[in-house]
Image (cartoon, rainbow, N blue to C red):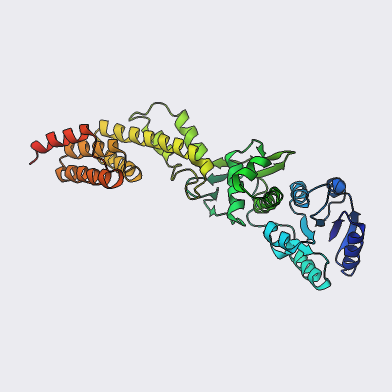
Amino acid sequence: MKAILVDDEQMALDFLEHLLREHNDIEIVDKLTNPLSVKENVMQTNPDVVFLDINMPQVNGLELAEQILEMNPNIQIVFVTAYDDYALSAFEINALDYLLKPIQKERLKKTMKRLAQNSPLVTEHSSTKQDRLLLSVCGSFSIKKENGETELVSWRTSKVRELFHYLLHNKERLVRKSLLIELIWPGLDPEKAYAQLYTAIYHVRKALKHYPDYFKLENMTEGYILSTQNVDIDMELWQQKLEEAPPITQQTIKQYLEAMEYYTAPYFDDYDYWWAENDKIRLERLWYRTAMQIAKVYYSVSSYDKAKEWYKRINERYPEQEEVHFSLMKLYSFINETEKVDEQYLFLKHLLKSELATTPNPEITSWYKQWKKYHM
């Protein structure tokens, strides 16, 4: 196992080298006191592990670590720090990934054992580049492979998950580090906030190593760019199919039904992200308009059962929309389901009173009273 040791203090480097010499399964290929030369050295020597001091004056060790992992995600990083609290609270990573100064022999033995067990990741998740992944952002996030298998990604923390989701939300675009700090770690001390960001990026990379042909996370000077290839996103497919579809008629309704299968829940609905709210509202409005068009087309061609099915789906999703209640009332009246007309109106009346302290639209009430005269 080839190792690079990085610490701005020569004495600390020499001591770590001394301890590691007692382990026959490791070869020290370089010792560096200048962190600015680490990336070039990594490219030249291709190490298996980098022992990296966090507290260096020229560069943040956590940021340097995630830059190394960007170059080669299979390199293992062992952080070295003199601060126990900093390690435990800021890193939020497992015991393999940090050593406390002064380094103890027994503690180093445990780390070496874990390093040996943590060989470069090759898993059943890896696929050929010809395969495509379907990412679901409806409700909760999941990944579906071409064979139909659905996978849920295990994120280290909710902050790591939100970081990835926001980068995906802005895929192919630069997202500034300062914005990510403000968004995910507001109010936190800047030094700690950046430590959290670099650690979270570290864990995003670890999660994405399961899908090497599909995601690329680049570290730019001021931020990050997440790129995808061989990837489809259900929400994007849905919008694309609706945009490409001709005006909805009896002849074209099948295209709309196929498109609507991609939209199964509101955008990132399970996570309550405030930054997704505007898109969630916009997409929900699009779903509502499209669903109403589908129901109206079915009604116009006398497919009353299908029209009823769609109106009820819309009604369950948007119980506060009086237009849907009114459409159902008129449909029930037309197909002589008179009890359902009463039930729908009374349900609407109760709902508006209990939830909004108001009454149904005068047009609906007037229609209902007129209808009631002939159905006593």
Residue 358 at x, y percent in the picture: 26, 40
Q: Residue at x 78, y 64 (%)?
A: 99
Q: In the rendered view, would you say 56 is above or below 345?
A: below
Quadrant where the image shows the N terminus: bottom right
Q: Visible in this render: residue 350?
A: yes
Residue 287 at x, y percent in the picture: 40, 37
Residue 76 location, quadrant: bottom right
Number of marks in the rendered image: 0
Q: In the rendered view, would you say 85 is above or below 367?
A: below
Please state which of residues 325 and 12 is positioned toward the viewer in this rendering. Answer: 12
Q: Residue at x 61, y 38 (%)?
A: 171
Q: In the rendered view, would you say 268 is above or below 29?
A: above
Residue 265 at x, y percent in the picture: 44, 45
Q: Visible in this render: residue 132?
A: no
Q: Residue at x 43, y 45 (%)?
A: 264
Residue extending farthest to the top is: 247
